[in-house]
């Protein structure tokens, strides 16, 4: 049975497990109908021209894993940002792990989607925010909506900021030969609230995993949210990340995506600017080898005047890896004085690697500043000679240059320990040991 | 130390060096002058091992060894240093970290242990002082946003750190104001010893007022067409390069 049929067939059983009386029931039903009609996206669709999901649909994924997987903290410590104290929302094979997690209800809610969806006290918030910006048309998003059960729920009320960053960690044990996960996150920072989130998906074996994740993020007036996605999974793990962000006046939201791993990764990152004087920051570093594939599809929709967006994606592609960057900017007619900046630079370090990059600007206002640039090139030979003439070997010199190339994306990471971790991951990915921490 | 014998080199079928002969002994300073396009910078790059250039004839011997097959880093490990005319910017890598890497990579190649951190710091402090470099400067990203003078001073600082046997200065004076020129030249002079040697490539005589050369060579069209002592540099300054060109034709 192909994956679509399997998902449709299991939907009834899934609904019976969860609360049928929940108001979310109608949303789920509508969503599964949409998915049934549309099915998985395919390469004849412009947005999926370079990324094929066909091979994944032939895998016999387990949809509902056994619920008894446990892990010792020491086994997974390395996947946490353990250098500092953090709140943790941890899932093992999609099931919440209370003993690996550290949640809170102390002035802010950092807890579980399953609680938020079922407990009456959260009902008013769910009614206002849940599935409000996630697409009701895009089929993978609706597939996730249909199977919404678990994920991270973060609610930061007005003027509050949690004491420490929040880590959302999805671990898969490999107890199933192949596993499909569909986490659903809802993150809300009300007026003048502040939040830092680190999200990571990690499989512990090389058994196949497919994650179709949806995250809705709401940034209220004057809110500040920094979101970091660390994508360093095994080359048997595929991730489709659908993130939707709604911003209000004066808010600032940044999303950094570090894609160094995985088999197939698709990032659909969507910003909707619904207010004035706000800033949206989208940054990414992609470093791939083997036959890895990463596809970044970004959308920034400027709906109001006087707002900014900054996109800066750097990619380094080796071996037979492939990359895609598609950056769409829409500036509505009333969104005058928009300042939208987009940059995508790529280094190909192998003859067999490839990258497709495409800016897509739809500008309906006449008084805007929009700039975009994309480059595909190779390592600067003069720079390489410079470093080698100082006694630094070719491999290390190349790594330093690649690091320098990606560096300005790292500069805006505001958690120093995370920046250090990313630097070490980069050094590891580039296969070098330098005399200092990058 | 350095013996260049009848060296021919070029790039993409374009001949640039057309029979260079040069011998540099320990303790000597050689100046190479000449008009633009005469091949001065190419000579510097070829000695340092830039792979884009093809050596088609002749030899470069360094301490008696033919270095034609050696990579740029291997040449650096043997004690050849090139101060670049246009140093490259490396964002995110501080001057200090860059020097640590360069020194330890060189030591590794020479079969030595990494330099202990305190010794490294001491060396950095000492050499920074020599070049009148502020400590804040050392934590900045290598060459990024440096002024022309800062870049050149940084090149000589690197040379002081790496303590090469042969230092090649490729137009280190270009773009320097008189104060920076004095600092750079003073740095070079303080590094001079009986064991090392320098090849100073310059378009102008000005630098040679501060770094007094033992020999002056004039390049034209890929060849050394005239050699002399420091008086030759003054003569060139006065008369320009045209008479050399005419002489070369004759």
Image (cartoon, grey):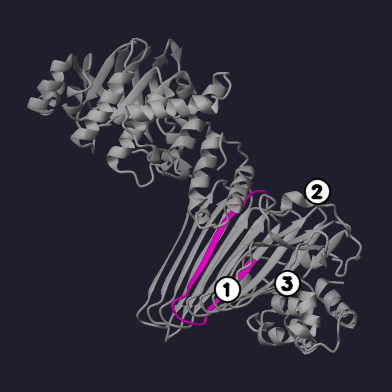
Q: Nearer the viewer, mark 2 or mark 1?
A: 1
Q: Nearer the viewer, mark 1 or mark 3?
A: 3
Q: Earlier in the sequence, mark 2 or mark 3?
A: 2
Chain letter, disc 2 residue? A
Check the picture and name the quadrant holding the N terminus of chain A: bottom right
For image coordinates 48% across by 78% down, the residue present is: A330
Q: Within 10 angstroms of label 1, few (less than 14), some, or many (20 or more) residues?
A: many
Q: Which residue is mark 2?
A: A74
**How far apart, in angstroms, are the residues tagged by discs 2 and 1?**
34 Å
Mark number, residue A193: 1
- Which chain letter goes with mark 3? A
Left or right of B8: which side holds B91?
right
Residue A113 at what x, y percent from top left?
76, 75
Magenta stretch bounds: A267-290
Q: Is residue A178 above or below residue A398?
A: below
**Left or right: A367, with A415 as reference point:** left
Q: Which mark sits nearer the N-terminus, 1 or 3?
A: 3
- Is the magenta region chiefly helix, strand or loop? strand
Q: Work out how far the residue at label 2 is from the one at label 3, CA to CA, in angstroms.
A: 26 Å
Front residue of A162 and A223: A162
Q: Where is mark 3, residue-wise? A: A105
Q: Could one spot residue B246 in this view of the protein? A: yes
């Amino acid at each position: 049975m192909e994956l679509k049929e399997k998902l449709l067939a299991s939907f009834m059983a899934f609904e019976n497990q969860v609360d049928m009386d929940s108001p979310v029931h109608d949303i789920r039903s509508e969503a599964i109908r949409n998915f049934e009609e549309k099915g998985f996206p395919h390469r004849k669709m412009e947005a999926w021209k370079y990324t094929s999901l066909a091979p994944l649909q032939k895998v016999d994924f387990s949809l509902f894993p056994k619920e008894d997987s446990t892990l010792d903290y020491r086994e997974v410590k390395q996947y946490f940002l353990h250098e500092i104290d953090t709140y943790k929302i941890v899932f093992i094979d999609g099931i919440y792990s209370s003993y690996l997690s550290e949640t809170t209800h102390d002035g802010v809610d950092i807890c579980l989607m399953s609680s938020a969806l079922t407990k009456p006290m959260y009902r008013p918030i769910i009614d206002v925010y849940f599935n409000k910006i996630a697409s009701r048309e895009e089929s993978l998003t609706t597939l996730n909506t249909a199977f919404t059960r678990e994920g991270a729920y973060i609610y930061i009320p007005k003027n509050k900021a949690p004491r420490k960053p929040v880590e959302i960690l999805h671990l898969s044990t490999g107890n199933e030969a192949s596993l499909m996960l569909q986490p659903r996150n809802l993150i809300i920072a009300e007026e003048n609230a502040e939040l830092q989130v680190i999200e990571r998906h990690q499989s512990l074996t090389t058994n196949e995993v497919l994650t179709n994740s949806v995250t809705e993020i709401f940034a209220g007036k004057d809110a500040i949210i920094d979101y970091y996605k660390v994508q360093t999974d095994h080359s048997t793990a595929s991730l489709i990340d659908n993130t939707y962000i709604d911003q209000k006046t004066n808010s600032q939201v940044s999303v950094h995506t570090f894609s160094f791993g995985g088999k197939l990764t698709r990032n659909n990152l969507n910003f909707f600017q619904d207010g004035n004087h706000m800033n949206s920051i989208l940054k990414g570093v992609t470093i791939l080898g083997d036959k890895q594939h990463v596809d970044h599809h970004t959308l920034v929709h400027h709906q109001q005047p006087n707002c900014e967006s900054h996109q800066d994606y750097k990619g380094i592609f080796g071996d037979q890896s492939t990359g895609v960057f598609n950056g769409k900017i829409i500036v509505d007619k009333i969104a005058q004085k928009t300042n939208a900046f987009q940059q995508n630079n790529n280094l190909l370090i192998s003859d067999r690697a490839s990258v497709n990059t495409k800016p897509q600007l739809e500008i309906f206002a006449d008084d805007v500043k929009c700039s975009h640039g994309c480059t595909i090139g190779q390592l600067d030979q003069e720079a390489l000679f410079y470093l080698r003439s100082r006694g630094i070997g070719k491999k290390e010199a190349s790594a330093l240059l690649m690091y320098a190339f990606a560096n300005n994306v790292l500069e805006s990471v505001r958690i120093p320990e995370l920046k250090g971790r990313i630097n070490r991951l980069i050094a590891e990915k580039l296969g070098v040991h330098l005399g200092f921490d990058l | 130390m350095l013996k260049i014998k009848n060296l021919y080199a070029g790039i993409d079928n374009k001949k640039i060096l057309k029979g260079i002969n040069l011998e540099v002994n320990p303790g000597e300073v050689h100046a190479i002058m000449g008009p633009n396009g005469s091949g001065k910078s190419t000579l510097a790059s070829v000695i340092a091992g830039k792979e884009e250039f093809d050596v088609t004839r002749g030899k470069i011997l360094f301490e008696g060894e033919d270095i034609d097959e050696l990579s740029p880093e291997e040449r650096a490990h043997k004690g050849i240093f090139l101060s670049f005319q246009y140093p490259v910017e490396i964002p995110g890598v501080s001057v200090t970290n860059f020097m640590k890497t360069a020194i330890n990579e060189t030591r590794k190649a020479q079969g030595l242990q990494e330099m202990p951190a305190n010794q490294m710091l001491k060396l950095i402090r000492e050499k920074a002082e020599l070049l009148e470099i502020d400590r804040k400067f050392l934590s900045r990203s290598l060459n990024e946003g440096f002024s022309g003078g800062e870049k050149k001073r940084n090149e000589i600082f690197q040379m002081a750190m790496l303590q090469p046997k042969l230092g090649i200065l490729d137009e280190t004076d270009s773009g320097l104001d008189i104060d920076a020129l004095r600092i750079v030249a003073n740095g070079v002079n303080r590094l001079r010893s009986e064991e090392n040697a320098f090849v100073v490539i310059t378009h102008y005589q000005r630098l040679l007022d501060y770094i007094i050369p033992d020999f002056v060579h004039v390049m034209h069209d890929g060849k050394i067409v005239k050699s002399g002592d420091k008086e030759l540099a003054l003569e060139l300054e006065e008369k320009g390069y045209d008479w050399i060109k005419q002489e070369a034709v004759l």
